[in-house]
Amino acid sequence: MILGPLLDQVPLHLLQLVIGVLLLLFGIGWLRKAALRAGGVIPLHDENAIFAKETAGLTAEVERRQTSQDWIAGIAAFKAVLLEGLEVIFIVIAVGAGRGMLWPASLGALAACVLVLVVGAIAHRPLARVPENTLKFGVGVMLSAFGVFWTGEGLGVDWPGHDLALFVFAALFLAAGIMAARMVRQPIREVTP
C-alpha cells in the first residue's frame, strides 16, 4: 500500500529498462551455463544424487546442532526460491505499477503461483524425468528474451509485431544457445553430484 503510490511516480520506461536489464543478465547467465553443460564443458548434474547429498548434509547438520529439521529445511527452501521470487516481483511491479494496475498484476501473480503449485503437485513425477539442463536452457532462453524485450521497451523501441517479438527473441536465443553448445562441444564427462 505504501510502495504502490510511490511506484506510480517512477516512469514506466525507467522501470522496464531496469527490470529488462536484470532479466537479461539472469537469463544470459542461465543460458551460458546450460550451453556449456550441453557442450560437455561443465559436467551435467545428477539431481537425485545432489538431493541425497543435500538431505544427508541437512540431517548431519540437524544432529550436530540439535535443532529442528524444519528450520533448516525452511532455510534451504528459502534459498532455492529466492531468485525466482525476485523475478516474479520484478515482473509484477513492471507490469502493474506503471499503469496503475498493481493490484490486478499482484492478483495475477498470486493466481499464477497457485496454478504452478497445483500443476506441480499433479505433474511432479513426469517433470522429474525432464533433464535439468533442458529446463535451465528453457529458462535462460525465456529470461533473455523477456530481458531484451523489456530493455527495448524501456528505451522506447516500438517492436515490430509488438508482443509477438518475444517469440522471435526466444527463437534467436535458443538458436544462439544451441550453436554455442555445438561450438564448445567436448566429450561429455561423468555426471557429478
Image (tube, rainbow, N blue to C red):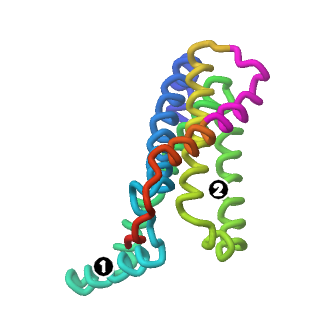
Which dot, 2 or 1, sits closer to the camera? 1
**Which secondary structure is most common in the magenta stretch?**
helix
Residue 101 placement (x, y as % from top left): 69, 31
Which quadrant of the structure image shows residue 62? bottom left
Q: Amino acid at mark 1?
A: Gly
Residue 108 placement (x, y as % from top left): 70, 45
Residue topped by disc 2: 113
Q: 126 or 62, which is in the foreground? A: 126
Residue at 49% over, 49% down: 35
Residue at 40% over, 54% down: 41
N-terminal-most mark, 2 or 1: 1
Mark 2 neighbour class, 10 Å CA radius: few under 14, some 14 to 19, many 20 or more: some
Q: Residue furthest front?
A: 187
Residue at 45% over, 35% down: 25
CB under 8 Å between callouts 2 and 1?
no
Q: Is residue 186 left or right of residue 100?
A: left
54 up-or-down from 37: above or below: below
Secondary structure of the residue carrying tag 2 is helix
Q: 189 or 77, which is in the foreground? A: 189
The numbered disc on residue 57 is 1
Q: Quadrant of the N terminus?
A: top right
- Residue span colored magenta: 158-172
Task: Let me know if residue 165 is in the magenta part.
Answer: yes
